[in-house]
Structures are given as structure tokens and as C-alpha cells.
Amino acid sequence: MTRIIWDKGFEKSYRQRIRILPAVRNEFFYALELFAEDPFHPALRTHPLTGPLEGLWAFSCTSDIRVIFQFIRKTEVLLVDIGSHEEVY
């Protein structure tokens, strides 16, 4: 199982962009459960980022909501940002 750490910036983004939307919040926690079990589950469409975000990774919660994260160790990740495709990239 993957250990998940919420960065302070992630917590702020979550409060501002996701917590206020109940349907999206439920999708986020479902995706987070999948991610904790298998970060590369096909439903998450996990992929490495390029350009200014190189070294970070992303997975999808919904068709538009993405979570940006960084692998710290093989079984530990730091969540960095969450929001729509436009907000996080």
C-alpha cells in the first residue's frame, strides 16, 4: 500500500477547488483509494509530467480533475496540487 502525504499547498488547493463540490469530492476519495492500492491502476491514467513540471506525476480523478504528485520513495508519495486540467498544468 502506498503512503500518501498531503503537502500544505495541496491542502489549500483541495479546500478551494474540491471540498466545496460534493460529487467531485467523492470521486477524489474513490480515486485516492485506488491510488493507495495501485498508483498505476489503469482507471487513474497515471503519467509523468514534462516541461516545467518534470519530475512530477499526475493521475485523473474525473475527466477534468487531476492530482499532481511526487514519488518520495517506492511506497510513499507527496500530493502537490489538485484541480482542473487548466488549473494544475
Image: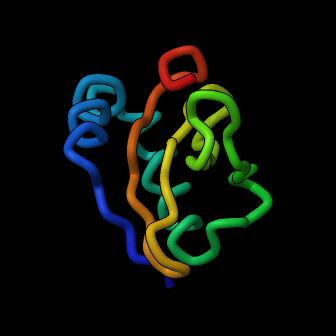
Residue plotted at (50% across, 25% down): 88
Q: How many marks?
A: 0
Hey, which residue is sitting farthest right in the picture?
42
The C terminus, quarter of image = top right
Along the line of sight, the residue nearer the viewer: 15 or 23: 15
| Vertical position of residue 43 compared to residue 89: above or below | below
In this image, 60 relative to 40: left or right? left
- Residue 33 percent location from the top left of the image: 50, 67
- Residue 67 percent location from the top left of the image: 51, 42
Residue plotted at (25% across, 37% down): 9
In this image, 55 relative to 72: left or right? right
Along the line of sight, the residue nearer the viewer: 1 or 62: 1
Residue plotted at (49% across, 50% down): 69
Residue plotted at (62% across, 36% down): 62
Hey, which residue is sitting farthest top in the picture?
86
| Vertical position of residue 21 compared to residue 2: above or below | above
- Residue 86 percent location from the top left of the image: 57, 15
Along the line of sight, the residue nearer the viewer: 86 or 23: 86
In this image, 22 relative to 36: left or right? left
- Residue 20 percent location from the top left of the image: 27, 26
